[in-house]
Amino acid sequence: MVLQILLGLPFLISHPIAYISRAFNLGRVFIHFWSVNFKFIPEPLFVSKELAVSLLIAHLVLLAAFTHYRWCKHEGGLLKFLHSRFVSLKKSDKSGSSFKILNKEHIVTTMFVGNFIGIVCARSLHYQFYSWYFYSLPYLLWRTPFPTLLRIFLFIGVEICWNIYPSNAYSSALLLCLHLVILWGLWSAPSEYPYVDHKAHKEKRKEK
């Protein structure tokens, strides 16, 4: 995030409005023919602002829901998480204590699921966009509570949909359904403790 701001800083200083409006062009109209995920929607609806706004709202709602009920579940939700971090920050300034360390698996899961939510709610996915989440898909499937056979079928199904050219109403509808099933699996997966066990962490450091 910081690196992205630094790279764009010369443009933000010289032409801020033009840079931001082009970088976040929410009014862009995509070509219906190239859509892999919404080819089943009639073209007038596909290019409409109503669909764009609906998907944007769905994206924000899903991110908020996962943040509050999944990623910050052990803290009691997003607001309590922010409050606890604020309190910990004040205490650390006085006592020099440190924050709890998030385990690597929780960090990776949060990043991959957040990216996948963006994929599910994307206005249009073109063929090159498969690279956005292909390598994270096996990991995401194994984070679901589904049987192994179903995970494999879901992966193969997504792969087949992306390899149909040109996409059609059936392949795009199937892809959306598969995405939603995976998303439901990620939502219903058992919640795990997100922090590193301090005792185990100290023992590993001593061994090194």
Image (cartoon, helix red, strand yellow):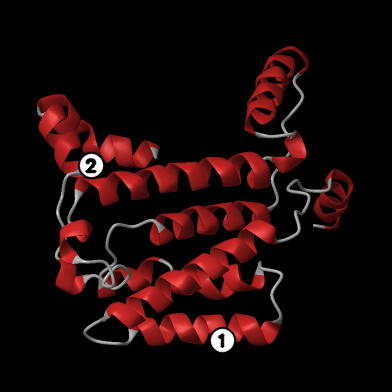
Q: CA distance from mark 1 to mark 2?
A: 36 Å
Vertical arrangement, residue 72 with respect to residue 34, above or below? above
Task: Check the image and report above or below for 29 versus 174.
Answer: above
Q: Position of residue 26 (x, y in %)?
A: 22, 44
Q: Quadrant of residue 88?
A: top right
Residue plotted at (19% across, 51% down): 48
- Res 188 label: none
Taking depth in this image into account, of 178 and 142 the one nearest to the observer is 178
- Give the number of the disc on residue 24: 2
Q: Quadrant of residue 99?
A: top right
Which quadrant would the C terminus be assigned to in this image? bottom right
- Tell me the number on the disc at residue 153: 1
Q: At 65% across and 73% down in the image, what residue appears?
A: 142
**Image location (x, y in percent) of residue 43:** 17, 64
In primary-sequence order, the first of circles 1 and 2 is 2
Residue 142 vs 82, above or below: the answer is: below
Looking at the image, residue 64 sits to the left or right of residue 198; the answer is left
